[in-house]
Each structure stands twice: as structure tokens, then as C-alpha cells.
Image (tube, helix red, strand yellow):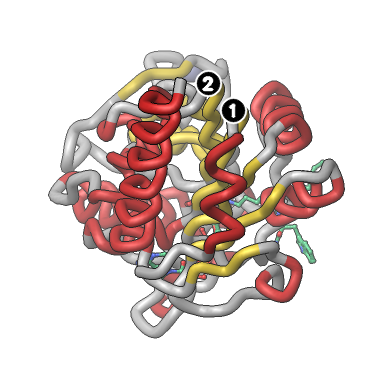
Amino acid sequence: MEIPAALIERLEGARRVSALTGAGVSSESGVPTFRGPKGLWKQFRPEELATPEAFQRDPRLVWEWYEWRRSKIASCSPNAAHRVLADWERRFEEFWLVTQNVDGLHDRAGSRNLVKLHGDLWELRCAGCGVRERNEAVPLPAIPPRCHCGNLLRPAVVWFGESLPEAAWRRAVEVARSCQLFFVVGTSALVQPAASLPWVAREAGACVVEVNPDSTPFTPFADVSLRGPAAVVLPALDQVICQVGQRDEESS
Ligand code: BV8
Ligand code: ZN
């Protein structure tokens, strides 16, 4: 994968770097994306399943979909892209990762400076008393699962029409505003407000790099567009970063 010289130059001086990921970063791990030919939404429509109304109307159906996704993701492992993003916490003075993904693969790859905009598939929360629990059982003993208070437990994810967690959104905007380099990896850049983060970074003067095999509505506005799968492009980028790091060490 050829990395443009202009990007190598920006990488040389970069201290504060951030990334936004979407479902595409997990596709090489075997996790289905939402759009695209075999996309998740193909079989289901978001308004049918990933909304509070759908859960109200038919909690069992919504849980069957989440059980299916949990069982699929349970057999997936982080791929090279997840691992590189976890390594970048040690490569740069300050690296933060903002993800739209709920699959938990960034955690499993070792990312710690991680902002989860849309929650976590492996956490349940009570629709009544608000209690939250981590539960990785596949399958769950019974669906829809019930809280000890008698109310239904729901996946601790953000559904369409629900607000993002305040603190997570605030942190994500801060991170996009303060970085010198902003990577947009594996997202169709369609779901708001996450899709506004590359714009926030761009307006704050960051160099915005898109990593995606396809073009997206943001592509024309990216400073650099690396057209390829994340599990190929990110390791290639990481190699350049290591070489630059070695050069710095030799020259200092
Ligand atoms: C909110 C958790 C308001 C659940 C998710 C009309 C216009 C604009 C906005 C709206 C509108 N109507 C409604 C809205 C708002 C709505 C929205 O944006 N809708 C969209 C559909 C238009 N947003 C919301 O509702 C948000 N909340 O706005 O609240 C509010 C305000 C105040 C008070 C009350 C309410 C909440 C949105 C969060 C929804 N939850 N997930 C779950 O997962 O079950 S969204 C879910 O879908 C993901 O988290 C992600 O965000 C999105 C999917 O997008 P991607 O991750 O980008 O994945 P996708 O498949 O689309 O694309 C994959 C990409 O990867 C592709 O580009 C592909 O080319 C690329 N790729 C493929 N292979 C690879 C690759 N890239 C790299 N390497 C590869 N190998
Ligand atoms: Zn409860």
C-alpha cells in the first residue's frame, strides 16, 4: 500500500492523533457491517429493530436479533486493524480512539483510550431501574432477559432516536477538536452525530485521513483517502510510523 509523502510528513510531527471507527474495521474479523452487499440491515431494517419503539413493541424479536449478533461476534477475534489502533496508544504522545462499534473488539485488542459512542453489545441495562451488568453469556439463559426488579433488561447500546451518552459525546468532540491527525476508518459516514466528527476535526485544522475500500460522502473532503481494507492499510501506515520513529531516534 503506497502511503503519500504528504501524509508521511504529517506523521513525522504528529503528537496528538485520533481515530473514528465504524463497522468496516471489524469486517475482516467476520463481523457483518450494516450496509454493503451482505450488510446487517439487508436482512433487517433499522427502524424494525434498533429503536426503543421496536423494543417496546416486540422485545423478544429485538432480543433474537441481538442474540444472533452476540453469537456471531463471540466467534470473531480482533484483526490487524484493531491491533494497530491499540498499538498507537504507545506510538503517539496522545492517541484516542472513538468508535461507533458495539462489538467489543477494540477492548479485546487492548485499546484503553477508547470512547464508545453507541454503547456495548456485551452490557445489559435495566429498562426500569437502570442497573447495568456485563453479560457475555451466549446464548443468554432466557430472552428477553429480566432484571431482578422484574423489568426487562435491554442491550446497553444507543438506538436510533436515542441520545448518545453525554460524557462520551463531549469527549469525542474534544478529541476531534484537539488532534493534529484524524483517521476515519471503516465508516459509511451516514449516522449522525458520529458522522459529524470528521468535520469537527477538519474545521479545527487536523489532517483528516479516510481509510475505506469504498468512497463515502466524506471522501471528497478528506485530506488523504487511502482506498483499501483497514487490516491492510493500517499495518502499512504503522510500518511507516515505526520507520519515522526510528529515523527520529537516530537523528536525536
Ligand atoms: C440521535 C448501536 C437524536 C445499535 C447504532 C435524518 C437525517 C440525519 C440524521 C437522522 C435522520 N433521521 C434520524 C436521524 C438521526 C439518526 C441517524 O443518523 N439516522 C441515519 C440512519 C440517517 N441518529 C440517531 O438516531 C442517533 N441519535 O440522533 O439522537 C436525539 C437528540 C436529542 C434528543 C433525543 C434524540 C443515534 C444513532 C446511533 C444508532 N445506533 N448502533 C446497534 O449496533 O445495534 S448505529 C450503527 O449504524 C453503528 O453503530 C454505526 O453508527 C452505524 C453503521 O455505520 P457504520 O459503522 O459506518 O457501518 P456501515 O455498514 O454503514 O459502513 C461500513 C463501512 O465500512 C462502509 O463504508 C464500507 O465501505 C467500509 N468497509 C467495509 N469493509 C471494510 C471497510 N472499511 C475498512 N476496511 C474494511 N475491510
Ligand atoms: Zn431493574
Left or right of 214 in this view: 29: left
Disc 1 residue lies near ligand 1 with CB under 8 A: no
Which quadrant of the figure has residue 103? Answer: top left
**6 or 238, nearer to the observer:** 6
Circle 1 — which element?
loop
Badge 1 crowding class, 10 Å Cα cut-off, few under 14, some 14 to 19, many 20 or more, is: some
**247 or 89, nearer to the observer:** 247
Up-down relation of residue 227 to residue 117 (above or below): below
- Residue 78: x, y in percent? 24, 45
Check residue 86 in the rendering and tell me which mark sits there, or answer none.
none
- The answer to whether residue 61 is seen in the rendering is no
Up-down relation of residue 152 to residue 28 (above or below): above
Residue lying at 38% horizontally and 15% vertically, measured from the top left: 148
Residue that numbered label 1 is attached to: 15
Residue lying at 78% horizontally and 51% vertically, measured from the top left: 202
Rounded to the nearest angstrom, the CA distance separating label 2 from label 1 is 5 Å
Check disc 2 and give the amino acid type: Glu
Residue that numbered label 2 is attached to: 93
Image quadrant for the N terminus? Answer: bottom left
Circle 2 — which element?
loop
Which residue sits furthest right?
203
- Residue 240: x, y in percent? 38, 49
Which quadrant of the figure has residue 61? Answer: bottom left
- Residue 133: x, y in percent? 38, 19
**157 or 173, nearer to the observer:** 173
Check disc 1 and give the amino acid type: Arg
Say which label, 2 or 1, has the lower sequence index.
1
